[in-house]
Image (cartoon, helix red, strand yellow):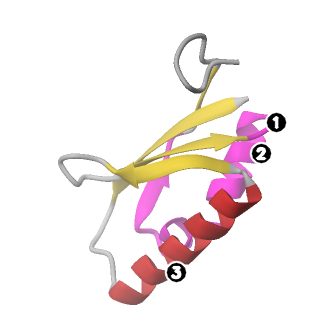
């Protein structure tokens, strides 16, 4: 199942945490867990599209993000089943 996971930033992002977040994202993309990710506009948070078996699995994956570990961002994973477009099932 796919999950749209918007985040909201809770505090400023230190440069070293941003670098760790980007490393985590790249590894998750390379593994196929994350389909796409980017910053929201305005820059109040981000959005990750990921694959997971359940909401609990999505939450567990997102818990590994350095932004979560450092209390910088909170995610709200929402499952969805695309029916049209590039991500359709």
62 up-or-down from 53: above or below: below
Query: Is 75 within the magenta?
Result: yes
- Measure the alpha-carbon separation of dots 1 and 3: 25 Å
What's the residue at 75%, 41% (across, down)?
Answer: 56
What's the residue at 29%, 47% (across, down)?
Answer: 40
Task: Check disc 1 and report the residue beneath it.
Answer: 53
Residue 44: % across, % down: 25, 52
Instruction: Specify the farthest residue to the front.
Output: 86
Query: Is 69 within the magenta?
Result: yes
Task: Check disc 2 and report the residue beneath it.
Answer: 57
Mark 1 neighbour class, 10 Å CA radius: few under 14, some 14 to 19, many 20 or more: few
Residue 69: % across, % down: 56, 72
Q: Which mark sits nearer the N-terminus, 1 or 3?
A: 3
Mark 3 neighbour class, 10 Å CA radius: few under 14, some 14 to 19, many 20 or more: some
- Measure the alpha-carbon separation of dots 1 and 2: 6 Å
Q: Which mark sits nearer the N-terminus, 3 or 2?
A: 3
Element on which disc 1 rests: loop
Residue 50: % across, % down: 63, 43
Element on which disc 3 rests: helix
What's the residue at 52%, 47% (across, down)?
Answer: 36
């Amino acid at each position: 199942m796919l999950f749209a996971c918007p985040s909201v930033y809770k505090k400023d992002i230190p440069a070293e945490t941003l670098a760790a977040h980007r490393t985590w994202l790249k590894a998750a993309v390379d593994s196929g867990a994350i389909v796409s990710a980017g910053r929201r506009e305005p820059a109040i948070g981000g959005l990750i599209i990921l694959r997971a078996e359940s909401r609990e699995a999505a939450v567990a994956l997102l818990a590994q993000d350095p932004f979560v570990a450092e209390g910088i961002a909170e995610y709200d994973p929402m499952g969805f089943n695309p029916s049209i477009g590039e991500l359709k099932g």
